[in-house]
Amino acid sequence: MTIAMRKSILILCILLFSAEGFSQKVNEQDSLVIRNLFDMALLNGKSYDWLDDLSNQIGGRLSGSLEAEKAVQYTKEELDKLGLDKVWLQPVMVPKWTRGIPEYAYIETAPGITSIQDVCALGGSVPTPDGGLKAEVIEVQGIDDLKEYGRERIAGKIVFFNRPMRADLIHTFEAYGGCVDQRYSGAMEAAKYGAVGVVVRSMNLRLDDLPHTGSMTYGDTPIRQRIPACAISTNGAEYLSSALKLKPDLKFYFKQNCRVFPDVQSHNVIGEITGSVYPNKYILVGGHLDSWDLGDGSHDDGAGCVQSMEVLRLFKEINYRPRHTIRVVLFMNEENGLRGARKYAESAKLKQEEHVFALESDAGGFTPRGFSFDTDEANFTQIKSWEPLFKPYLIHYFEKGGSGADVGPLKDGKTVLAGLRPDSQRYFDHHHAANDTFDAVNKRELELGGAAMASLVYLFDKYGTKSNLKQLKN
Amino acid sequence: MTIAMRKSILILCILLFSAEGFSQKVNEQDSLVIRNLFDMALLNGKSYDWLDDLSNQIGGRLSGSLEAEKAVQYTKEELDKLGLDKVWLQPVMVPKWTRGIPEYAYIETAPGITSIQDVCALGGSVPTPDGGLKAEVIEVQGIDDLKEYGRERIAGKIVFFNRPMRADLIHTFEAYGGCVDQRYSGAMEAAKYGAVGVVVRSMNLRLDDLPHTGSMTYGDTPIRQRIPACAISTNGAEYLSSALKLKPDLKFYFKQNCRVFPDVQSHNVIGEITGSVYPNKYILVGGHLDSWDLGDGSHDDGAGCVQSMEVLRLFKEINYRPRHTIRVVLFMNEENGLRGARKYAESAKLKQEEHVFALESDAGGFTPRGFSFDTDEANFTQIKSWEPLFKPYLIHYFEKGGSGADVGPLKDGKTVLAGLRPDSQRYFDHHHAANDTFDAVNKRELELGGAAMASLVYLFDKYGTKSNLKQLKN
């Protein structure tokens, strides 16, 4: 146990035993409200039905696609039905990239001796030439290897980034964070050494046949120097790596005809219940409405959208009239641009909308384990004192850490930012792949997330943050 | 917060802050060993591969079946390969019940107007007559309703037990416990009022088309008065209930030709690493090798078996030489008889084998959330002091409660009994149904369970229980 941990526990003990009267009052009333929210979600929750529509009636919602626009219309209509005080669309220009016809790839160990591989273009990649791209392969364990190998060994080849996600990390998002630079910057970096293409091992902890897409950047690489990049399934990556050991001069072929179009207009979908005491102070819950195109985006991030909508629905259901304005925001274009989040934050700044608390759900619809908070020690101490209220629901994890990509631009040192933390073990089995589909979501797990979010929002609404606590007590 | 909870926290604080030197020593050495166990399981665990064989090469392992015997042979062979000090089979006579040809059922609202339903015979049920059984239906919400309705309304009818599992309970096993009397005793009780058959709503929190089997009893009902019992899918139960509201005199037909054979000999599979200090004191880890026949028994309880085997494998891998004898027991016939568990406990008693700690995994192969302990306050206080060692793995749930059916017969007031507690939200989607299959198990979740079990066994081996703590310190 670190000293910091002991300190936290000591502080918790002091809170629990010295302010007993306060603590009991908090517990009894609050635990009833929270029980009510969980009962409502588990017995009559709407998240699952909404997700069914979003996933099975609409499907994958890549920014700029028809499906993304259908999702905007659908969620606005559903928010309209909830009897909120205000529902509107916030226009935002988003990139439009299309995958085109299905990608095709193979390993050629000798002329005519090929084995077909499962690949997909990375989001934002340029296409290969019409006839595809075939070249020798150099396998690397990461971007650092490029410098070591140098232009001499890399030029004219396809660079194969094959550093796997670390299986020993309990938090799978950490393992993702430790690997995703290969996908995001691999092509940009490899092009500097004369590579002609890039193949990246899918960001997946499991061995299977599904390629996982995701965003990439070319930075300021001139258009003519941009090289195509694809992801290969983890089984494919293992196979390619073995084959290279036996035959280092084998060739890899892939063909993709993805394409970038001019930006198009889309929208963030926003709804709110006006605060009874602080109508001009905001508590935000949100997820992102866009998704990748291979699956239907159920976990990433249909789940977060419907859970966020559910927070407001639950408040209406239990007749809770919040003190702050509670706003749901379904952000557009998290996956390949973050334009919706930036637009929202800019607009909020322009209008001087004070955001007290912003909570994002963008880590899948699995059993909620807790929340991660991006805030200072004073606020975190208060948050930790709420933990026992979540214990009956087995939501024990309240830790400092990141929040979410879409609430990130709201960071100003005062707003408490947070992210729902569902169980993460299965998440990267589905993330950005064709099996991110509705059948991989369990109704109870999904609804528990909405209830947990509503409970936390309720507590922030009632007790405020440390920066505005004094004024709430008046 | 209850007074009991505050007390527990206070005790924890005292432990953490007063015995600092001790606590730090515990933490540093132990946390390294535990990290090592988790790394080994996550990077090179064997649970998943074993389960693949058990599920996909052997399949459902109903007591008395050929598959059950294959599983005995397979697991013994695998234990033999681990280089344990002893591996053997413990003979036990088990019941043999077979399902026969697939069941068939329909609702008849008018002559010739039928709708086919998904049903399965309950384990141990008698067959229907060869031509099937057709009768009017009386829907009840539980066994208590039978008395109220009385023989007059029940005689000659099929009783339809339709009380659903409570969706508002977070611990789904509690919801199961609150419902399963309908399945277990429904037929025995309904027969007393002249019912001719029983249909039970499947023990499933989800609405789907899969019937869930499970054990039932006729008690001492004379053979000729025993009535057949089947489970209907939750969708079917909803449909039947609605149809009964529209047409109370509809008829239900079902046909099943299950059969009981004389008992046959089977085995518990046992392996052990002999203790270096206390060879005659035992720490047991186990699961049950038999399963129902509809799926392949991956979650119930192939998972528990391979995790238990993995505990011993991990100890060999990290070269840990235990002080106590660590024994893995794969119990036969948990599902419909508990004969293996009873046999093991009887034999242990006869041989005066002192069991210090017995840990069962029989709640699915999902992400481990913690353990439930059946023990006294003194032992539980020590156990709670270990909780911080499991926190890095997000295994926070250490509570008093039940342990497991197979370790239950070892209960003697001294042995600490415990059960692994995986996340339970999805468990009853699969429990005893055709979709309890390998593809519903995630490798990481499964391997985490084995590592968590090994870590707990390590701590009990090192620190002993309160009843033998004094002597360990000598």
Image (tube, coloured by chain):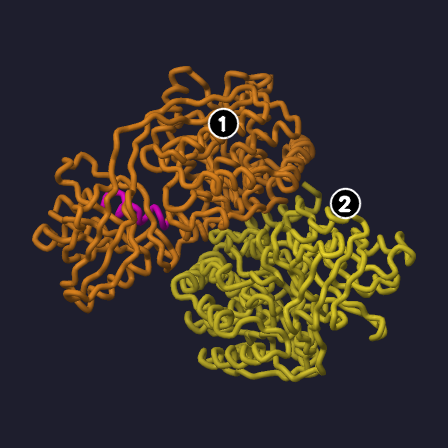
Chain colours: A yellow, B orange
- Quadrant of the frame with the C terminus of chain B: top right
Magenta region, residue range: B175-186
Q: Secondary structure at mark 1?
A: helix
Residue A223, image x, y percentages: 83, 75
Going by the numbered disc 1, the residue's amino acid type is Lys
Please give the residue where the numbered disc 1 appears in the rendered image.
B76
Give me the disc on residue A246. Answer: 2
Check the image and report above or below for A205 versus A308: above
Q: Residue furthest left?
A: B152
Q: Which mark is residue B284?
A: none
Label 2 crowd (10 A; few <14 / some 14-19 / many >=20): few
Horizontally, is B286 left or right of A199 in the view?
Answer: left
Q: Position of residue B355 (x, y in %)?
A: 46, 23
**Residue B139 found in image quarter:** bottom left
Q: Are marks 1 and 2 in contact (CB under 8 Å)?
A: no
Determine which quarter of the picture holds residue A404.
Answer: bottom right
Residue sitting at 82 percent across and 65 percent down? A188
Instruction: Please say whether residue A305 is one of the residues in the magenta stretch.
Output: no
Looking at this rendering, what residue extends furthest in the front direction?
A: A112
